[in-house]
Amino acid sequence: MEQMKNLAYYNGTITLINDMMIPANDRGFYFGDGIYEAAMVFDHKIFALEDHLDRMCSSAAMVRIELPAPREEIGALLSELVLKVESSCQFLYWQITRGVSPRNHLFPEGVASSLYVYSKPWKGVEMSDEYRLKSIKDTRFFHCNIKTLNLLPNVMAAEEAKEAGCHEAVFVRDGYVTEGSHSNVSMIKDGIFVTHPLDNLILPGTERKHMIAYCKELGIPVEERAFTLEELMEADEIIMSSTSHPSMRAMELDGRAVGMKAPDLVRKLRDKYMEAIR
Ligand code: PLP
């Protein structure tokens, strides 16, 4: 099989990413009317594919988008597409929108949803011990559990954090920490792993889920509860997690030194992740 440097797929057409053309009438363009997923590919295999397909199905159902094909077929297509890319380690992204139709707020009738996929070479897993965070007011809507394309507040927060010399934003709503602009926030305090409960205020992160599972295997107690910014400041460790950045350990929050006090627990969790991807 002839392999490509990178790949884009849109409703049956395959090109290089930079050559892909998407109709302007795709509802993702006007309304962000769609949902997405991102996954890591190691050794040409999609890591935690079932978790991503689970969340794809629940996001699509919550915004009443019908999948363009059954879940298993989408999984099989994605697994096939990553084989076409030269690099064995890839970052895979896909989105499903409510299809192509002239702009109108109402759902179009009789229009199939669109599937866009890209996969590109990735440098491998990144883990940092030097993450800097900035707290930012969480002004997002109340459907943060849906992985929708509507990421403008997340984009604004990520940029604000960057302009303050930080790597990631920490959203705070009504005094409680919710999540990052593109990651979940968890902390370790007195040997307990604490993370926001699954509700409409955070995205159910796959790495959050995996870390909870690793804690259970390691006998580390887990509390899924909301915590304040002040508690986070006093945490023994702060871990930001996402698919492409599974274990980013924060050393600074709003200019103050934080965390870095339970290195052994962080190492154990990272070892579990490395075991899982192996
Ligand atoms: N929260 C938000 C807002 C995100 O955008 C992401 C990932 O992009 C996450 C959490 C982490 O999710 P996952 O671990 O599945 O990558």
Image (spheres, rainbow, N blue to C red):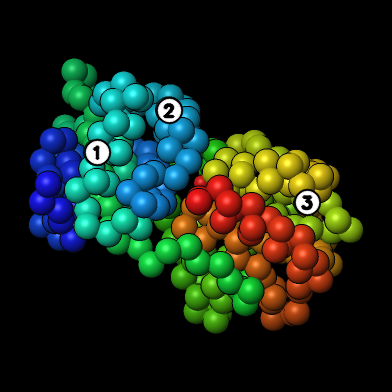
Q: Residue at x 13, y 35 (%)?
A: 12
Cα distance, mark 2 to mark 3?
28 Å
* Residue at which label 1 appears: 80
Residue 107 in view: no
Q: Amino acid at mark 3?
A: Phe
Cα distance, mark 1 to mark 2?
20 Å
Q: Give the numbered dot on residue 193.
A: 3
Q: Residue at x 31, y 21 (%)?
A: 70
Closer mark to the observer between disc 1 and disc 2 = 1
Badge 2: residue crowd in 10 Å (few <14, some 14–19, many ≥20): some
Closer mark to the observer between disc 2 and disc 3 = 3
Q: Give the numbered dot on residue 57.
A: 2
Please state the horizontal and vertical placement of residue 57, each as a whole percent of the image: 43, 28
Badge 1: residue crowd in 10 Å (few <14, some 14–19, many ≥20): few
Q: Give the numbered dot on residue 264.
A: none
256 or 269, which is in the foreground? 269
51 or 56, which is in the foreground? 51
Closer mark to the observer between disc 1 and disc 3 = 1
Q: Amino acid at mark 1?
A: Glu
**Quarter-of-image position of residue 144:** top right
